Image (tube, grey):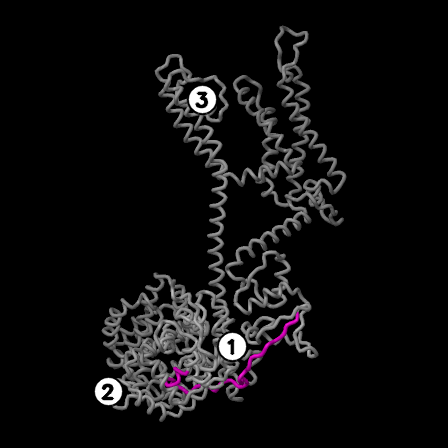
Amino acid sequence: MEMATVRHRPEALELLEAQSKFTKKELQILYRGFKNPGAISFYECPSGVVNEETFKEIYSQFFPQGDSTTYAHFLFNAFDTDHNGSVSFEDFVMGLSILLRGTVQEKLNWAFNLYDINKDGYITKEEMLDIMKAIYDMMGKCTYPVLKEDAPRQHVETFFQKMDKNKDGVVTIDEFIESCQKDENIMRSMQLFENVI
Amino acid sequence: MAAGVATWLPFARAAAVGWLPLAQQPLPAAPQGCEARSDEVLVVNVSGRRFQTWKNTLDRYPDTLLGSSEKEFFFDPDSGEYFFDRDPDLFRHVLNFYRTGRLHCPRQECIQAFDEELAFYGIVPELIGDCCLEEYRDRKKENAERLAEDEEAELGGPGGAGADWALPPGSPFRQRLWRAFENPHTSTMALVFYYVTGFFIAVSVIANVVETIPCAAGGRAGWQEEPCGDRFPLAFFCMDTACVLIFTGEYLLRLFAAPSRGRFLRSVMSLIDAVAILPYYIGLFVPKNDDLSGAFVTLRVFRVFRIFKFSRHSQGLRILGYTLKSCASELGFLLFSLTMAIIIFATVMFYAEKGTSKTNFTSIPAAFWYTIVTMTTLGYGDMVPSTIAGKIFGSICSLSGVLVIALPVPVIVSNFSRIYHQNQRADKRRAQQKVRLARIRMAKSGTTTAFLQYKRNRGLEVGLCPGPALSTRSRSAFEQQHHHLLHCLEKTTSHEFTDESTFSEALGVISLGGRTSRSTSVSSQAVIGTSARASGLISSCCPRQSKQRRAIRLANSTASVSRGSMQELDTLAGHRSPGPQSRASLNAKTHDSLTLNCDSQDLVAAIISIPTPPANTPDESRPHSPASDSGEGPGRPSGGSSSSNRGALRNSSLGPSYLLHNTVKISSL
């Protein structure tokens, strides 16, 4: 009997409410959407968890022009905190709680975690390049101005020049947070997605 | 439209937090008016039966009646519920569509009624899930065919014999004549003609039959009995002539009245008519001598085809003919397998009976007759084997005849029926796949065009107010937020979404601009740097195939361009092929066009990058700035030199004309 057919039941509502920053009502709304995603018809996900294919499918609906599978893969890894190959409702809620209701510190932490692909505490240029390429892939082909091959690379150079204070070729969490806090554009845009639910 | 995933939009927007530290430009403000929506239970009253559902569920599909603001038209404030005066049983399926995302087709309901309900609620029937799609299509096709048949019969097409209404009085004689021929019940004259021709067909056939009966010789010489045809040649000749005259007249009249003479000439019935009357005329003009009388007799055989003329008078005959035609392949296979068995057994019997003297089995083809007669269990007895081996094989032949003929017929028929349906299902599945892909593509293009439309609207009023107040038109909250998300992505990467045409335009103009820059002198360093970018341009346009060639091209272009002579640039420019077309054919993704265009784009790109380096962020210092930088006007992000005043206000509405302006400036250096 495969484990996949075992239905996953999320933690109790009170427990999640205590752990995350959502109210009960919001959690209810989130769970209904999570459990019954609607017309994701190509891949059946066992109820209660979302696997990577469904994740990619969902993301591709939002970015029709480009190829969002790589970025969705990185996102999936960022959400799947226990690395068991599927995102349960708890993972989902904890991730959203940080992104929408967390402090700036927490959000930056989450972003750093996203960029640090192998989770070793350092963002190398290669990791950043992968992330950047994934983001640029989402733009697709038809862009203005025309997307050049090394646009991601240059973007990475910019990023490292800004973030890598000691010029050792990697960005640590402290460098990252410090640099972001100095940039007021970034600080201002952190407020952008607060009212999302 | 990303229908059904509206519930995941908040998540996608939240995940965009990951772009924030990377954004090169300030991100746009979030759309106003999307305050926290709390979910509530809506009551939908359909003819008395109350359905309750979450508002979010209905909002999943914003372009249907229930998902949009259209449902407010049905809101009853007194009871606080939405009242629809429609079928409650069918509404169940509609609501399930919102809940599960799959539209199912009810088996016991009329397809027409279901279609009407879907049309009312604004749901496209193509959204029917795969489990029910096949059946839905079949039933719909059945219905359509039935309706078409009725309609055709109404109009009185070639197969129909039903329309009884008279033609409008002003219609031409020709049309009335054709109508009279096809539908004899319309007028008395037509009916009379119909019966007269029928009578004469019968007379002609009977005459053909009777003239071969031996009549009593009477008082003539000898007791020989001769056929009636030879006894009363004149009478039969007169009857034949009369019939043929009538048939010829009918044929010519039909030919005259036919709306499409070519089609009439090719039709089966007219061929039968022609075959029926030709032998008479041939017989008339061919002199009666013994040499040709044999052929003449053969021709008379064709007179029996007149009996097929009855099929105009009988619907049943036509149906029989059609059935035989549709079973042609099965019958053909049956015949083939029988032929194989016959040949095998005939050969065996021939060699078995070879030794016997005075045997009927003189050759293998002669043994065919025996085999057929035995296998079909007829057993005439005119050919019988005499040797023991012959008898043994003869009995095997007759036993297997029963099996070969009786068994495969139902098996073949059912097998073919199954394979035929399977084939049909495979075709259906392929068609479904195509439909599904088309649906996905349509949805994607719909989203893209909506976003581009939004941007255009926004671009028009960028001076008026920062908020998208006027340009919302009737965008739902979902759309607003989705567009904001796409906008954030644009700002993060400093590139904008465009559509295909603008994209190809931009590329074409770039290559145009490249040509006019011939006069500039280039430093080798700039060239090397730019040819690196050139290769970048190539691989973005020729994604896969060019990667291998890139290395080679790079060396070539670097070597050739770094010489810096104008002649080199001239030759390179001369290789330019029309930009937009090559782009379009690249999109077509054929290997040949890719190779061709990669070549030309490659060389052109080497020139392109020189005057127009790619768009960059304000604070990126560019190590290789081309020498052809000039003091361009503000607002030109790809100005190249870091010192230029970048307003960084890229206005998409300027587009290609802007680029042209820039390139003209360069050439004036």
Mark 2 highlights which residue? A168
To which quarter of the image does residue B201 belong? top right
Secondary structure of the residue carrying numbered label 2: loop
Q: In the figure, is residue B73 to the left or right of B441?
A: right
Q: Is residue B504 visible?
A: no
Q: Chain of mark 1?
A: B
**What residue is rendered at 62% in x and 61% in y?**
B114
> Is B420 situated above or below B403?
below
* Position of residue B382 measured from the top left corner of the image (x, y, whole percent): 47, 17
**Which tag is nearer the camera, tag 1 or tag 3?**
3
Secondary structure of the residue carrying numbered label 1: helix
Q: Does the magenta portion include B38?
A: yes
Decide: few, some or many residues near mark 3? Use Cα within 10 Å; few <14, some 14-19, many ≥20: many
Mark 3 highlights which residue? B370
Amino acid type, callout 3 = Tyr
Q: Which residues are magenta?
A: B17-45
> Is B8 situated above or below B390?
below
Q: Which residue is more in the foreground, B24 or B128?
A: B128
* Position of residue A179 measured from the top left corner of the image (x, y, whole percent): 33, 91
Amino acid type, callout 1 = Gln
